[in-house]
Every structure is written in structure tokens, then in C-alpha cells.
Image (tube, grey):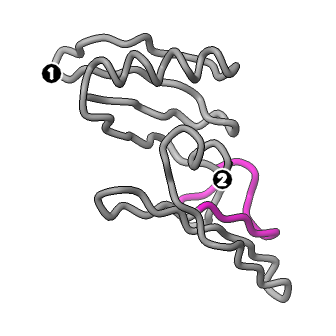
Amino acid sequence: MRSFYTTYFQGKSHAKYINPKKGFESYMLHFEGGCTLEIMSRTDVDQVRNSEDREFIGFAHLAFSTGSKDQVDRLTERLRQAGYKVIGEPRTTGDGFYESVILDPDNNRIEISA
């Protein structure tokens, strides 16, 4: 996962933090503009969502703005050529945004927008 976000979205990664006592590992990825994404794993986290009050693997939706329609098109094609599944081709949405949607290595939906 870390490699996906550093390669395609230019995230800058800190060293892996490991807490073996708690079964916790994480990377902090920092992006231009100040956004930070923590990619973590824990041995006690459910594989599927089965309760509103417990943590589970995955998230519903993450969006990255590339700044232009051309950038959306180029990054979408680059990801497709690298073998990632494009589930929403580049398009202008009903509310006026230009975007595509791909699946990351864990099948999370990643929106790429202008």
C-alpha cells in the first residue's frame, strides 16, 4: 500500500513504526498541501465490517485532486497500464467535477479529480 501512494500520488513516507506489544504497524504518508494519510495494520482489527463500534479493514472512498483534466486522464491511464482496475472512466460528473475512480491494491475506491 505504501508504495502505491508514494509512486502514484507522490506521498512522502516516514519510516515504519512498529509496536509489537500491541500488534500495531503504521506508515505516515505526507502529501503536498498538508494532507496526511496513515496506513496501519493491527492484529486485532476485523477483516470485515461487522459492528458500528469496532474497527475494520478498509475505507469507503478517498479522493486526490490532480489539478487538471489532463492530469486525471494521464494518471488514470498510467494506473491502468500498471494493472490497476479502473472502475470509473474519466468523465464530468452531474455536479460538474471531472474525475475517474480506480481500485488501490486493497480494492479501496480512489477518486482522481481535477
Question: What residue would you read off at disc 1?
Answer: 95
* Mark 1 surroundings within 10 Å by alpha-carbon count, few (fewer than 14), some (14 through 19), many (20 or more): few
Location of residue 5 in the rendering, given as x and y in whole percent from the top left corner: 57, 46
| Residue that lies at the very extreme toward the bottom in this rendered image | 21
Question: What residue would you read off at disc 2?
Answer: 2
Q: Is residue 15 magenta?
A: no
Q: Quadrant of residue 36?
A: bottom left
Location of residue 45 in the rendering, given as x and y in whole percent from the top left corner: 73, 64
Disc 2 from disc 1: Cα separation: 32 Å
Mark with earlier residue (2, 1) = 2
Location of residue 79 in the rendering, given as x and y in whole percent from the top left corner: 58, 23
The boundaries of the magenta stretch are: 39-52
User: Does residue 17 appear to the left or right of 34 in the view shown?
Assistant: right
Inspect the image, locate mark 2, and give the three-letter code of the amino acid beneath it. Arg
Inspect the image, locate mark 1, and give the three-letter code of the amino acid beneath it. Asp
The residue at the point 43 percent across, 18 percent down is 74
| Residue that lies at the very extreme toward the right in this rendered image | 20
What is the total number of numbered labels drawn onto the structure image? 2
The residue at the point 82 percent across, 69 percent down is 43
Location of residue 41 in the rendering, given as x and y in whole percent from the top left corner: 72, 64
Tell me if residue 110 comes above or below residue 13 in the rendering.
Answer: above
Q: Is residue 50 magenta?
A: yes
The residue at the point 53 percent across, 59 percent down is 52
* Mark 2 surroundings within 10 Å by alpha-carbon count, few (fewer than 14), some (14 through 19), many (20 or more): some
User: Does residue 105 appear to the left or right of 51 in the view shown?
Assistant: right
